[in-house]
Image (spheres, grey):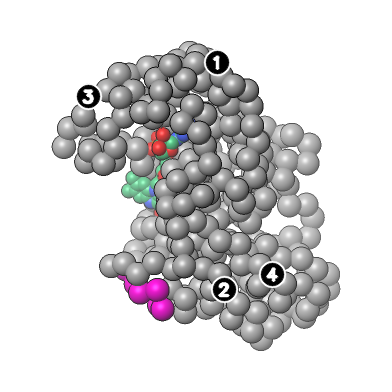
Amino acid sequence: MIPATFDYVRPASVDDAVRALADAGEDAKVLAGGQSLMPLLRMRLAYPDALIDLDRLDGLREIRDAGDAVVIGAMATHHQVIGDPLVREHLPLMARATETVADPAVRHRGTFCGSLAHADPAGDLPAVALALDAVLLARSVRGEREIPAAEFFVDWMTSALEPDELLVGVRVPKLGAGWGVHYEKFHRTAQAWAIVGVACAVRRSGDTVEDARVALTNMGPVPVRASGVEDAVRGRAATREAFQAAAGHAAEGTEPPTDLHGSAEYRTHLASVLTARALSAAADV
Ligand SMILES: Cc1cc2nc3c(=O)[nH]c(=O)nc-3n(C[C@H](O)[C@H](O)[C@H](O)COP(=O)(O)OP(=O)(O)OC[C@H]3O[C@@H](n4cnc5c(N)ncnc54)[C@H](O)[C@@H]3O)c2cc1C
């Protein structure tokens, strides 16, 4: 399987990269880790006129402390995210979910931002970005733009990025003290994509849930925040029974697909079961 021909650009700076994107027009693609894009090129499901390779932009590999948030550079790999002390301390949900992504080879090349830009509904990390209220940082020759995760995923494999916009990083607010987290992923085999996944964070005060964040993977064309579940647990007892009852709201407002791995009805059932498990694990009850 040989990709169609394309112009190859390997810019040395972010400014050069956004200029190259602008010059290339609508049919250019950005290449980050290549773990999703290369298979599409080889199968000719994507055939851009130009490929803008970010590999030389070492400044984008940084994961840095930004006070009340952590900024993940666009070229920070899954492997980096998993091992990064800032992520492990302040964003353990991100580390936990990223550990379930693919295998070590993919995690050494694939990037957190590439996963978000790819906007695959079966990808694990869009739901994490949504649960953590991440803000995506885009740049083009027209300037900079911040896009909340809640507005970034617009349809099946479609993000709010304009064709001339480069994602330079993601700002993820630190969760703060008192939060427990869990990512519950149901997949056919280890290293496979999620049939359904649940990203969950719970803050307890004694036996009561003070706050909760729940977002679902692969329950529709875009990741979904399970706000019905969040409302049902806030201010209530942190018990398995209460979580099971609240998890009944998990599939509200979702459009689960039917595919080879499961029907929409099966996914609806899974969303409820996995949400109850994720809440219990995050709240440690
Ligand atoms: C065998 C295998 C198993 C996998 N299993 C899982 C899994 O279980 N869970 C999971 O979540 N993912 C999985 N993945 C996907 C993996 O996480 C990829 O790393 C990720 O989807 C894309 O990251 P990337 O850096 O490789 O992006 P690329 O493949 O380089 O790019 C993907 C898309 O995003 C765009 N893009 C990338 N970076 C930018 C940027 N900075 N600005 C603008 N656009 C950009 C590209 O143009 C392209 O359209 C798997 C991949 C493989 C090959």
Instruction: Give the residue type at disc 2.
Output: Glu
Query: Depth-wise, is mark 2 or mark 1 nearer the camera?
Result: 2
Residue at 42% x, 48% y is 157
Residue 147 in percent (x, y) is at 63, 40
In the image: residue 279, left or right of residue 68? left
Residue at 59% x, 21% y is 142
Inspect this view and state whether residue 59 appears. no
Q: Which mark is residue 243?
A: none
Secondary element at tag 2: loop
Disc 3, disc 2: CB below 8 Å? no
Disc 4, disc 2: CB below 8 Å? no
- For label 3, the crowd category at 10 Å Cα-Cα, with few meaning under 14, some 14 to 19 and many 20 or more, is few
Q: CA–CA distance between discs 1 and 3?
A: 25 Å
Instruction: Give the residue type at disc 3.
Output: Thr
Give the labeled residue for mark 3.
Answer: 5
> Is residue 5 within the magenta segment?
no
Q: Which quadrant of the view contains residue 267?
A: bottom left
Nearer the N terminus, badge 4 or badge 1?
1
- For label 1, the crowd category at 10 Å Cα-Cα, with few meaning under 14, some 14 to 19 and many 20 or more, is few
Q: Which mark is residue 252?
A: 2
Instruction: Give the residue type at disc 1.
Output: Asp
Q: CA–CA distance between discs 3 and 4?
A: 48 Å
Q: Magenta region: which residues?
A: 261-266
Give the labeled residue for mark 4.
Answer: 230
Give the answer, above or below, for where 7 lies relative to 263: above
Secondary element at tag 3: loop
Q: Is mark 2 within 8 Å of ligand 1?
A: no
Farthest residue to the right: give it. 206
Q: CA–CA distance between discs 4 and 2?
A: 12 Å
